[in-house]
Image (tube, rainbow, N blue to C red):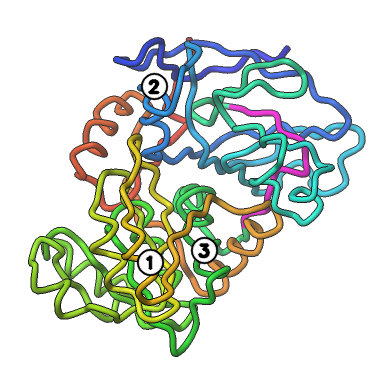
Amino acid sequence: MIQVNAHAAFSQEGPFKLTTIERRELLPQDVLIEIKYAGICHSDIHTVRGEWGPVKYPLVPGHEIAGIVSQIGSGVTKYAVGDRVGVGCMVDSCGECSSCRQGEEQYCLEGNTGTYGATDRHGHYTQGGYSTHIVVTEDFVVRIPDSLPLDAAAPLLCAGITTYSPLRHWGAAPGKKVAVVGLGGLGHMAVKIAHAMGAEVTVLSQSLKKKEDGLQLGADHYYATADPETFKQLAGSFDLIINTVSAQVNINAFLSLLALDGTLVNVGAPADPLAVNAFSLIGHRRSFAGSMIGGIRETQEMLDFCAEHQIASEIEVISADQIDEAWERVLASDVRYRFVIDISTMGKA
């Protein structure tokens, strides 16, 4: 096994501690990646704090990984030492089910293998990107285009693909009206990508405090959902709404904003169920859907799209000893718009 340095949570309460973890020796199809940057996703917090189910500690989160290939297995054909690469939310799948054969590994019928907090096919408990190195089979590694800075590209591996996938699937394009609920780590990427796809983009946020940011990111309109007049004014307006909020919201109120045959897609994942009134759907043949990340092929497509349109995440780079502080700031919505850990600051356990 390969010993690497990492910052791990040893309980729900934290704090993070510098430790060492084991990575498997390279198999023929494996790639060893020296991690340069790792984004902090709200999913990391949900998972470590047990909000999405039981957790085995210590746990190293992080599934927005950007780095450099430092070694390859004997059978690797897609990558070479020195390549700029990324790893997102999954590191394996069965490869044989109908979803996997369609390139939709995120919906693997046997369940994909998460980058952290999962048991892989080798019997190892997966540990994520808050670490100096990771070993991943080449089929679950993506290439980061040269024009994308590694630090700002890291969040694209979750926040970028999580929003790109539903925007592409439900046809964000010129002539379409798209609303984005929430302007955070996911929301700001949804605005950038939907704008680049040519849609008319509206941000729906609790207040107007980020209005200037939203318009600079590419939104055409910005409304405060705390104002009841917003829901009256925008009723029946949108072809597609992307809800990026990982907390309880009034889904029925947002469904009322959909036009005939419109769709509200949830990409945020609150711990508690969301209540949906059937009459919010049937009156105008509206749909309420969900979407999670994208397959490897689509993730590469997203990175290439972002490179073409000069899209990257808005980031604040932090050192490894600032992770606990950054988590508290994420919970307080005090980041614009993604924290990224500079792994070179990690030190040795």
Question: Front-most of 241 and 122?
Answer: 241
Q: Residue at x 27, y 58 (%)?
A: 182
Q: Is residue 28 magenta?
A: no
The residue beneath circle 3 is 166
Question: Front-most of 212 and 84?
Answer: 212
Q: Which residues are magenta?
A: 133-144
User: Disc 3 and disc 2: Cα gap in Å?
Assistant: 27 Å
Camera-nearest label, 1 or 2: 1
Q: Which mark is residue 252?
A: none
On the image, which quarter does residue 345 sit in? top left
How busy is the neighbourhood of tag 2: few (under 14 within 10 Å), some, or many (20 plus)? Answer: some
Amino acid on which the number 2 mark rests in the picture: Gly
Q: Residue at x 56, y 43 (%)?
A: 66
Q: Position of residue 101 (x, y in %)?
A: 81, 52
Q: Position of residue 253 (x, y in %)?
A: 23, 63
Name which of mark 1 and mark 2 comes first in the sequence: 2
Amino acid on which the number 3 mark rests in the picture: Pro
Q: Quadrant of the N terminus?
A: top right
Amino acid on which the number 1 mark rests in the picture: Leu
Q: Dot 3 lies on which element?
A: helix
Q: Residue at x 64, y 28 (%)?
A: 134
On the image, which quarter does residue 313 sit in? bottom left
User: Disc 3 and disc 1: Cα gap in Å?
Assistant: 19 Å
The residue beneath circle 2 is 50
- Residues at badges 1 and 2 in contact (C-beta under 8 Å)? no
Q: Is residue 57 above or below residue 232?
A: above
How busy is the neighbourhood of tag 3: few (under 14 within 10 Å), some, or many (20 plus)? Answer: many
Q: Is residue 138 magenta?
A: yes
Q: Is residue 272 left or right of residue 286?
A: left
Q: Dot 2 lies on which element?
A: loop
